[in-house]
Image (spheres, rainbow, N blue to C red):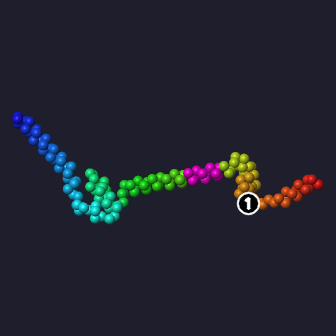
């Protein structure tokens, strides 16, 4: 074998061994007992151990996920702002619809007299059927 081919094959074998070592490195730190799954009684702990034995160790024993908590807080704040804006818009729409253009003109011409919208804010007087009946009797008599 020529020296360049020998160097190339040695280098390829070395790279392959290094790659195998990197792939197996994470598996070296499984410190659970060989039959730990049989000893564990809590189902959540069993699931956690099984996930720890998967490649990439998807399970973890961290506290609150800070990035997720921040994202959820931003979402909550945005929804609160949208709700507040919607509420303010509804209030302004109801206010503008209660004060019509005619009321505005009437108020400008006669500022001392109550407008239709002012009257609508007052409690309506109770109506009785007796009054209507009396009125009908008077008309028929």
- Asked whether 109 or 57 is in front, the reply is 57
Q: Is residue 93 left or right of residue 51?
A: right
**Residue 21 or residue 101, whichever sits in front:** 21
Q: Position of residue 133 (x, y in %)?
A: 86, 57
Specify whether 127 is left or right of 121.
right
* Percent position of residue 107, x then y: 72, 51
Q: In this rendered view, identify the residue nearer to me: 66 or 47.
A: 47
Q: Residue furthest top?
A: 2
- As for residue 92 lying within the magenta part, the answer is yes
Toward the right, the furthest residue is 141
Res 111 seen here: no
- The quadrant holding residue 32 is bottom left
Q: In the image, which residues are magenta?
A: 86-96
Residue 94 left/right relative to 63 = right
Q: Dot 1: few (<14), some (14–19), or many (≥20) neighbours within 10 Å?
A: few
Residue that mark 1 sits on: 123
Image coords of residue 72 (percent x, y): 42, 55
Q: Is residue 135 left or right of residue 93?
A: right
Q: Assess whether residue 64 is covered by the magenta stretch.
A: no
Local secondary structure at mark 1: loop
């Amino acid at each position: 074998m020529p020296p360049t081919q020998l160097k190339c094959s040695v280098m390829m074998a070395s790279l392959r061994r290094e790659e195998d070592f990197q792939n197996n490195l994470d598996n070296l730190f499984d410190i659970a007992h060989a039959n730990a799954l049989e000893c564990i009684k809590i189902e959540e702990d069993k699931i956690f151990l099984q996930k720890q034995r998967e490649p990439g160790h998807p399970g973890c024993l961290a506290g609150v996920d800070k990035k997720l908590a921040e994202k959820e807080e931003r979402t909550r704040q945005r929804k609160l702002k949208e709700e507040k804006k919607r509420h303010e818009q509804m209030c302004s729409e109801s206010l503008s619809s209660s004060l019509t253009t005619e009321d505005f003109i009437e108020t400008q011409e006669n500022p001392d007299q109550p407008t239709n919208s002012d009257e609508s804010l007052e409690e309506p007087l109770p109506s009785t059927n007796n009054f209507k009946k009396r009125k009908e009797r008077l008309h028929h008599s």
